[in-house]
Amino acid sequence: MFARHSLPLTFLVTGFGWLFLSSVLGLASLIGMVLGTPLPPWVRLVHVHAALIGGVVQLIIGGLLVMLPPSSQTGTARHQAHPLAFVTFNAGTIGILVGFWTHQTEVANTAGLLVAGTCAWIARLAWVRSTHSPPSTPNRWYYTVAFLALFAGITCGGALAFPFAYESYGYVRLAHIHLSLLGFIILVIVGAMHVLVPTILAAPLSNPRLGMVVSIMMPLGTAGLIGGFLNSSVPIEIGAGAILFVGGILYAVNLIRTWANSPHSGNAASDHLLLSTFFLLLTIVLGILVGANSLSTPPMMPYGTLHLVAYAHMAFLGCILNAAMGALSHLVPLVLSTSRASSNKKRTPYQERLTMIMDRWRAIQIGGLSLGTMGLGLLAALTWNVPLNSMSVRAMTWICFALLLSSLLLFSVKLATALTHRPEDPSPTTT
């Protein structure tokens, strides 16, 4: 399992496993909320941290290990990493979840140190290996900012357990969420997309200078947003959101132009990644509107728990999960072909066969995820006009459940099929 070439794949597959389990738990929580039988509060904490730490952060670690260049000092292959990092990270994740389940904050904080230690090791490895980064992509200082945001977010999360944070609990919690989600996860996704999308489409990035401008604007907007939270200043938050929106527009335009100039017809990986860009912009716009809505007392539009769930999942399902499924659709065939095929003559056709597997029924997979995500927004909007226990709200809930779960199940089946497909197996038929 921990072979030299398989460790990044182990991170990637395990990360998606966490995402799948946490998504099912989240869907169960949504159904319980709508049916009037909410699950215990600790379930929400387990769902969120299993998805973001066990799932997304672990996928980022696996992706970094795949894409890191060899060490010029040691000659170590890019796929080599210590298996202790995998065990420590997942043990820390489990410890965090057990701490929330048993209401033992000391257990959760101690386990968080294991996760932070693993991330610090990966960050150091990335710094050493990324001395020479392509000019069209954000450099290692950009990723340093992202990892610093992660460590700051972990610190804020640990501080929530101590009495000194009680007076400013809400602001520290907002900083914890946005430093981890926006400061680390979204920044890494944006940076990685400048490499992944051109690679998948077999075309250079349309405007490398624009990519560098984005790598400045996104961290700047994130810093302004966190500052607005800590100062309880909605105008600062809206101004920071405007910076993020302009950066997001430039980022999207660059990727769309790259796609338009490419001879590649696109596949499941590129479709997921481009849709992730759309949902990122949508989330930024919704965040600005949420801030503007809170300027009046009472707010212009009622804003409850279900609206918060819909807004948060525009980011998680629409942006992050789309990006994760797109990256896996590209990286899994790449890693499997590199580790299993003994020569370039065998490697290329094997990777193409694996890509064909990941491309199967992509319209159903991508449509289910995207429509299910948008359906959550419609579900929240319905509650402005009809009660939560109405038939229309319940029907929309089950529709979203079916769309999202079918997309996740379909992708899981394809992922399992690719993992069990060997180089000597016959070519799969296209669908």
Image: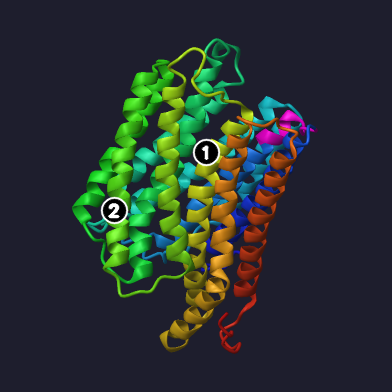
Quarter of the image where one finds residue 283: top left
Q: Quadrant of the N terminus?
A: bottom right
The residue under the point 55% across, 60% down is: 367
Q: Is mark 2 on a helix, strand or loop?
A: helix
In the picture of the structure, the residue carrying the numbered disc 2 is: 253
Residue 415 placement, left or right of 62? right
Q: What element carries label 1?
A: helix
The residue under the point 57% across, 74% down is: 360
Three-letter code, disc 1: Ala
In-front residue for pair 24/308? 308
The residue under the point 70% across, 49% down is: 24
Sequence order check, earlier mark of 2 and 1: 1
In-front residue for pair 54/255? 255
Q: Give the x, y percent position of residue 413.
A: 66, 68
The residue under the point 63% across, 28% down is: 305
The answer for how far apart the CA atoms under marks 2 and 1 are is 35 Å
Three-letter code, disc 2: Val
Q: In this view, does 81 lie above or below 181?
A: below
Q: In which quarter of the image is the C terminus?
A: bottom right
In the picture of the structure, the residue carrying the numbered disc 1 is: 116
Q: Give the x, y percent position of residue 189.
A: 42, 50
Q: Is residue 351 above or below residue 425?
A: above
Which range is magenta? 37-45
